[in-house]
Amino acid sequence: MKVFISGASGLVGSNCLKLFLEKGWHTVGSYFSFETDNTVFYDTLLPDHPMNFDIEEFGPDVIVHCGALTHVDYCETHEQESYEKTVQSTINLIAVAKACKAKMVYLSTDYVFDGKDGPYKEDAPMNPLSVYARHKLEAEQMILKEIPDSLVLRVTNVYGNELRGKNFIARIIDQCFNNQKLMLKLPFDQYASPACAWDIARAMHVLLNDNKTGIYHIGGSEYLNRVELAKIVLSYFPDADYELIPISTAELKQPAARPLLGGFICNKFLGEYPDFVFGTIDDYMKAVLAERKDWIN
Ligand SMILES: NC(=O)c1ccc[n+]([C@@H]2O[C@H](COP(=O)([O-])OP(=O)(O)OC[C@H]3O[C@@H](n4cnc5c(N)ncnc54)[C@H](OP(=O)(O)O)[C@@H]3O)[C@@H](O)[C@H]2O)c1
């Protein structure tokens, strides 16, 4: 299998790149502003940029589109930029995929739902509440219409290993390792199904191997709010100096509306792959601490 991954310097893309290379797939991944050892430059907004990796010459069977503007509150106040980085970038990659006769994989979100009655199955009615969410929905629908054998994986609350350590869990872990005081004001009423980026890559690998198409919800088995999530991570750092203030979403006044009961029912994926096991936050924390034995000894 030949795969091109846009946004392979980010959380999901870098895990896909690592796994696919380990599995022996001929894989090239791109960065945009954060160059990493094993990535090439590609700007999804400027397909004719002279520095762009030549995807058509590479001729992938699959293009995995992880490049995006993922800052939900920023998108709310920068609608045009959000459109360009989520919808226009997808339009541009669809054209490349068609030229290569490649299938696409798109990473979408539980924010396509309004969070009134989650967790959600794939066919639940959609009602995006924010600019980011509307653009993600537009992009996923466009891909499925233009390239019908494509895959859309909806994910949420992604955590895992990444060079910049910018995801929610990684930031808590880094601050604990660095003995920094943590001030955490977190919503107790936003629920989701956190997923490890490595598990998302593993799920994508089996789905691509079996040439699956359509929408799949990919999430871990835990259904947690942000306070519960942080408490699990903090429980591994008994000496951590932190203040954790649970707060309602209404009081938090985030610029973009959030689906409160988000997250996924993953029966479709798990029905097709009954032996597939998603890791838990505890599994991830134990693995992180095992890698940092020097810290605990
Ligand atoms: N993380 C989550 O919790 C979550 C939840 C739901 C859905 N998703 C979706 O999953 C996908 C991947 O998310 P992520 O968390 O891995 O995001 P991320 O870590 O922020 O990575 C985003 C990637 O996009 C690249 N990028 C940005 N602008 C680009 C451009 N103009 N051309 C090409 N690449 C560009 C970035 O490159 P540089 O860093 O090199 O600039 C980076 O590699 C996104 O579509 C996101 O909406 C994520």
Image (spheres, grey):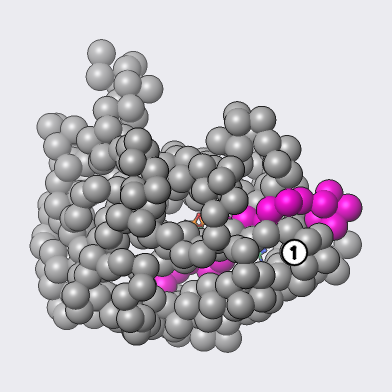
Q: Secondary structure at mark 1?
A: helix
Q: Quadrant of the C terminus?
A: top left
Of residues 252 and 128, the one nearer the viewer is: 128
Asked whether, in this view, residue 138 is left or right of residue 256, the answer is right
Q: The residue under label 1 is which amino acid type? A: Ala
Quadrant into which the N terminus falls: top right
Residue 62 covered by magenta stretch: yes
Magenta region, residue range: 52-73
Please say whether residue 91 is one of the residues in the magenta stretch.
no
The quadrant where residue 156 appears: bottom left
Residue at x-position 29% and y-position 61%: 264
Residue 160 screen position, x and y as percent: 40, 42
Q: Is residue 276 above or below residue 189?
A: above
Q: Dot 1 corresponds to which residue?
A: 97
Is any atom of residue 127 visible in this view? Answer: yes
Q: Is residue 138 left or right of residue 42?
A: left
Q: Is residue 30 left or right of residue 223?
A: right
How many numbered circles does the render carry? 1
Across and down, in percent, residue 99 comes to 83, 66
Q: Nearer the viewer, residue 133 or 75?
A: 133
Q: Residues within 10 Å of mark 1 (few under 14, many from 20)?
A: many
Asked whether mark 1 and ligand 1 are closer than 8 Å, the reply comes as no
- Determine the residue located farthest toward the top in the rendered image: 297
Residue shown at 14% from the left, 68% from the top: 189
